[in-house]
Amino acid sequence: TSISRQNWWVLLGDMGTGKTSLVLRFVKGQFFEYQESTIGAAFFTQVLSLNEATVKFDIWDTAGQERYHSLTPMYYRGAAAAVVVYDISSVDSFIRAKKWVQELQRQGNPNMVMVLVANKADLQDKRKVENEEGEQYAKENELFFIETSAKTAQNVNELFYEIAMRLAKA
Ligand code: GTP
């Protein structure tokens, strides 16, 4: 059997945390050291095969710059999944991620699958946010947590497959 779901996912997080890079790694297998900052939002579409089901979904990659903040509810309202990204080398980006989680808890779809992503896991020598801090926050807020690197591709497929699997079970 083949099940097709009309759904979209959204990526949120501070500027420069690697949202676009995660999507490009996943959708196209590409990574750019000098990835341009997103203006407004970017749209991607993807199809995944999960056992016997085919899941088709769209991804809205939002711009992290503060001036675009007022646009983001358009993308997260009604989203099936929200991926909140921070950069392990930036404490500020972790603080910003927690603010996103709070905003989604208040204003997002209550059934939304929420994921906290600690990106740039390849930058171990520049790490400012310990794995345990992210894990603990995710646990307290009932989020799925994963450390990724768009650069090395570590856990990138795992991240998106996990969301698809959680949605398929819902
Ligand atoms: P905005 O569009 O401004 O919100 O940024 P963004 O969150 O989409 O970040 P983007 O993907 O543009 O990446 C910002 C910078 O970080 C780029 O120079 C990327 O090459 C770099 N980058 C992204 N992911 C990783 C990663 O996993 N490891 C390392 N070392 N660099 C990364």
Image (cartoon, grey):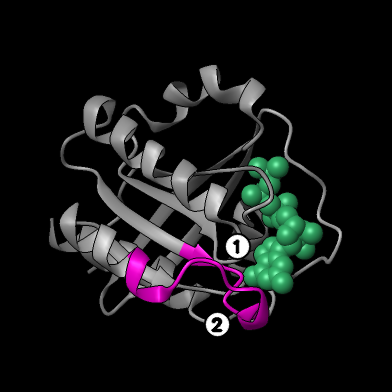
Camera sees residue 37:
yes
Name the side, left or right, on which 24 lies relative to 56: right
Mark 2 residue's CB less than 8 Å from ligand 1: yes
In the rendered view of the protein, which quadrant contains the C terminus?
bottom left
Instruction: List x then y, in percent, for residue 141.
Output: 19, 52
Residue 73 placement, left or right of 5: right
Q: Mark 1 is on which residue type?
A: Leu
Quarter of the render that holds ligand 1: bottom right
Above-or-below relation of 114 to 110? below
Query: Of 4 and 63, which appears nearest the observer?
Result: 63
In magenta, the rendered stretch is 118-134
Q: Residue at x 32, y 62 (%)?
A: 163
Tag 1 or tag 2, which sits nearer the N-term? Answer: 1
Residue 124 lies in the magenta-colored region: yes
Q: In the picture, residue 139 is in which quadrant?
A: bottom left
Vertical placement of residue 66 versus 164, above or below: above
Return the residue nearer the eye: 107 or 61.
Answer: 107
Mark 2 touching mark 1, by CB under 8 A?
Answer: no
- The numbered mark at residue 22 is 1
Neighbour tally class for label 1: few under 14, some 14-19, many 20 plus, Cα within 10 Å: many
Please tell me whether residue 141 belongs to the stretch shown in magenta. Answer: no
* Secondary structure of the residue carrying numbered label 1: helix
Amino acid type at image mark 2: Gln
Task: Tell me which residue sits at (48%, 41%) in the image.
Answer: 96
Q: Nearer the viewer, residue 107 or 138?
A: 138
Residue 154 is tagged as 2
How far is disc 2 from disc 1 in space, using C-alphas?
A: 10 Å
Give the SS element for disc 2: loop
